[in-house]
Image (cartoon, rainbow, N blue to C red):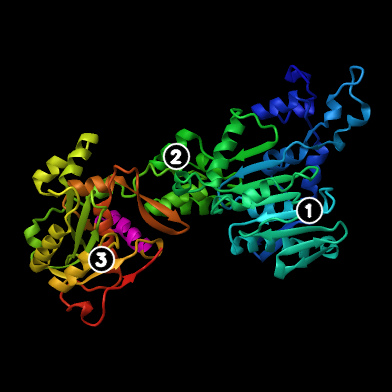
Amino acid sequence: MFKKLSQVDEMTRSVVRSPNDERAALAGYRFDPLAAEKVCEFLRQYCTVNVNTFDGPKKVPFAPAPWQRRDLLGPVFGWKRPPREYLQKLSGRPRKEWADVRKWRRRFTSAYWQTGKKNGKTTIDAGLSLYAIVADGEPEALVYIVACNQGQASICYSMASAMVEANPALNARLEDVPYGKRIVDHRTRSVLQALTKGYRGHDGPGPSFVIFDELHRQENDQMYRVMRYASSARSQPLRIEITTAGTSDDVARQSLCFRRYTFSKKVLSGEIEDLRHHVAIYEPSEAEQIELMEGGPALEDPAVWAKANPALGTTLDLDDFKHDMEEAKKDPAQLDDFLQLRLNVWVFSKRRYLPKDEWDHCARVRFDPAELLGRPFLGGLDLSSERDLTAFAALFPWEDDTFRLFVKFWCPRVTARRRELGGDIPYHKWIKEGYVSITHRKAIDLDEIEDFLAKFCSEHVPGMIYSDPWNARQLVNNLEEKHRIPVMAIQQGYAHMTGPVKTLSRLVSEGSLHHNANPVLDWNAENVRVKRRGEQVMLDRENPIGKIDGIAATVNAICAWEDGHTPGPSGSVYDTRGIIVIGGP
């Protein structure tokens, strides 16, 4: 409609902040400051939040912060798109009755907002959901707050319910139905409903307003697909996706949230032309994110913190944030969580789980394997697929409250040759030095491993050996029945592995795990990453070539130690029962 931005009205020009904003302005879209102010005024007048004071918690009006007005509420509710009739010139001029911007519909039908945690996302969820059923002007509005589980849905609904209870006007007008997590406006026959997975949709006009709370926690696309096209009959539907950054596992599996983040970044940059999708992403720059994942100075820079936390210094306490950062620096697992949840960084697993300086420090104490003869140990086995690396780890508790770690590897000759030719992995050197034993068959020879373990356990004192279940049943049976070696097969799930994986990190950080500079184990440690499910962690690796079998075997040995097995002779646990499998995902 316009050829140059200078032809657009001044008010609209003042809110152009992206290439797609400029495209919208040139296409005839306009900004209505009264519509933007309307939603902010509703939140101030009818919604309350709890704040901590010296006299205890106190309810105060929810006054949107300047950044919320400028970046979120103003654009989404203030931008309007013209009706087609307005753009159809009659006698060279638009018809006057279509020129009133107050009668235009909202420009945006979807929005993606991403910030660090504790920046008021749930509060704005609750306030906007009440606005949508009371003041948005949609007849028989149907508003959904979509959460990943009942707990998160309850948090959002409970905050909206508390706002209704605290305001006499809302309390008189709206019916709160706690058992159904529903709030009803009988005057307009509008409904606010908190939902979790399992909703399949229904007949009718569909939702007018949908909020996806913590999108990164959605396990799959099911709810999103249901909601995506359910609102087509509404006059100005709106879907808001509010979230914090996801995990490396989300990146690897291309989760819903990561796809929406990637799409939204391209919309924000103008690479994708989409005039109806609003984007607000608070995150450090790409260079700063790389520096953060490498543990660089950006981690301690308040200016970087503020980029992901627009509420920092107001509702988000700066000293508390600094304390959380200092705590996170002490543990790699906590640090990744801090980067993801507090600094809004998609952690792409580029940073190794066991920092090189700490791992190398554990090699300062060298020992002769002969020193281990006759001493008690706890063991771990990581049995590979038939043509890959297999590892056995023996963890020897020492008198100074440290551990000596012995690790042995096996690999088929064909695989070793193929791996060395395919990359810079010196299998031949490791074989010559005795760190890796080759099997002359094309697959791992379990008989050779059994013979080694029988000899090793005759020279040392086994307390318990934990093995992953893969390909393990026959070997476990033989070790126990033929050699009277105590062995258990354990599932490699989050529930049983979280503790041992974190203990591994702690021992390395403390310099308590003396690994004797085993070069194959060094390579494994370099490749170790972790994947997360909430607070739980499991071992992962950087890529298929980067093996971690020795570290996995070590974690199994640590697991045996943490489960309370005493290093040393105690008779066979199978004297009274058969083999069991413990743990689980």
Q: Amino acid at mark 3?
A: Arg
Q: Secondary structure at mark 2?
A: helix
Label 3 Cα neighbours within 10 Å, binned few <14 / some 14-19 / many ≥20: some
Find residue 169 and report its image quarter.
Answer: bottom right
Q: Secondary structure at mark 3?
A: helix
Compared with residue 60, is residue 424 higher up or lower down, i.e. above or below?
A: above
Percent across and percent down for residue 584 are: 39, 66
Earlier sequence position, callout 2 versus callout 1: 1
Distance from label 2 to label 3 (Cα)? 49 Å
Find residue 419 and report its image quarter.
Answer: top left
Q: Is residue 118 magenta?
A: no
Q: Amino acid at mark 2?
A: Ala
User: In this picture, which residue range is highlighted in magenta?
Assistant: 497-511
Distance from label 1 to label 3 (Cα)? 56 Å
Percent across and percent down for residue 296 are: 39, 40
Which residue is the extreme one toward the left? 370
Q: Main secondary structure of the magenta part?
A: helix
Name the residue tied to disc 1.
204
Q: Is residue 37 left or right of residue 72?
A: right
Percent across and percent down for residue 111 are: 66, 42
Label 2 Cα neighbours within 10 Å, binned few <14 / some 14-19 / many ≥20: some
Residue in front for this viewpoint, 336 or 511: 336
Q: Is residue 154 left or right of residue 132?
A: left
Earlier sequence position, callout 2 versus callout 3: 2
Q: Amino acid at mark 1?
A: Gly
| Numbered label attached to residue 473 | 3
Name the residue tied to disc 2.
298
